[in-house]
Image (tube, rainbow, N blue to C red):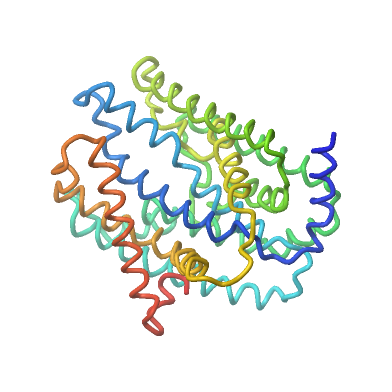
Amino acid sequence: MHQEKNLSNTAASSEMQPSYLAYANMMRIVAAIAPVLYHVTIPFFDLHESMSRLDWWFCNFILSSTPWVVGVFLMLSGALLLDPSKTESAKVFYRKRLQRVGIPLIFWSVIYLAYEAKYTAAGLTLYQALQRVATGQTAPHLYFLFAIGGLYVFTPMMRIYIAHATRKELFLGILLVFFMLAGGHLASSFARRGWMGGNAFNKFIPYLGYFLLGYYLRNVIMSRKTFVWVCGLWIGSVILTAVGTYALVFVLDIGREMLLYRVLSPAMIITTVTTFLILSYAFSRPSGKKTWKTNMVQKLSAATLGVFLIHLVFVWRAHDLGMIDWLGSVWVSVPVASFVILVISYLITFIIGRVPYVRCIIGL
């Protein structure tokens, strides 16, 4: 009861608080690690026939515990941008977001499509490239930019809804959105009609629940006991995803082996939401004064979008050249390669960020 009172009081006062969130910077930094691990590991997923079962389980657990990144990024965006007390006009908001997302989306779509056309065995024709653009699939990770861009379009309208909705109405609305979208995703997957959000214009729809939920949870205060329960729920959801994936690959053989890694699978929804809560709890204490550590955190945080955009080039190249295989066991190659690629991506991002006019390609 006391916990519910804390949550209610915090939620009721959230509209009166500034958009600054103490945990935002560290949440971005931690979230930047997950996509690198995921993309380094994913090529090993289809090698289950040639890998030892132990090696496959290692990769499976990494892939089961990292797809939350896009959902957490979207929740953090919702927490920061859906504040109804913001007074900027829709015109100003759209101009800022176009620079933040529009330019990187165009630039990196061209880069990844050109890479695929040059370096993949099948190549890529102009018509196929245009199809990728129309479907919002210019690169495996760039769907995030299509999704966040669509959510930005409706953010001013969602602020109005949030300003007039009660806390209970907002919560029930979010539950309904998740139920319908997750159900639609699973139905489409099992019917073999593809994943929801199939083109550049509706790519944002499956992520609407995460965006709204980020605002709903932005100032939630958990007790230590609740935090322990949330951590247990995170562990349980990851195990459920891993075991379920094992069943899909080795038992059921229904051709939907990666279904549970998707961001709208029920277990992954739990993993994503609990990750957000864990990180917000862990990094909720604001630092009192500026130090070299806080300055470094701010710089690393500002570079996370650039790292997210850049890293896949190095992952693809490392796999294409067989460099990751040089390290032998996946227990060594995955963490070492991920660390090296993460460092290189940050260095390149810092360099680009210091070049006027060019820095806009990483959203700065």
Residue plotted at (37% across, 56% down): 138
Residue 214 spot, x, y in % from top left: 66, 51
Choose top left, top right, bottom left or bottom right for residue 349: bottom left
Q: Residue furthest bottom?
A: 356
Instruction: Judge whether 94 appears above or below 219 on screen.
Output: below
| In the image: residue 325, left or right of residue 116 | left
Residue plotted at (42% across, 70% down): 362
Residue 137 spot, x, y in % from top left: 40, 53
Choose top left, top right, bottom left or bottom right for residue 226: top right
Residue 302 spot, x, y in % from top left: 48, 68
| In the image: residue 119, left or right of residue 8 | left
Instruction: Judge whether 85 appears above or below 271 on screen.
Output: below
Instruction: Judge whether 93 appears above or below 271 on screen.
Output: below
Instruction: Judge whether 295 appears above or below 184 on screen.
Output: below
Q: Nearer the viewer, residue 19 or 222?
A: 222
Choose top left, top right, bottom left or bottom right for residue 129: bottom left
Q: Nearer the viewer, residue 174 or 33?
A: 33
Q: In the rendered view of the protein, which quadrant contains the N terminus?
A: top right
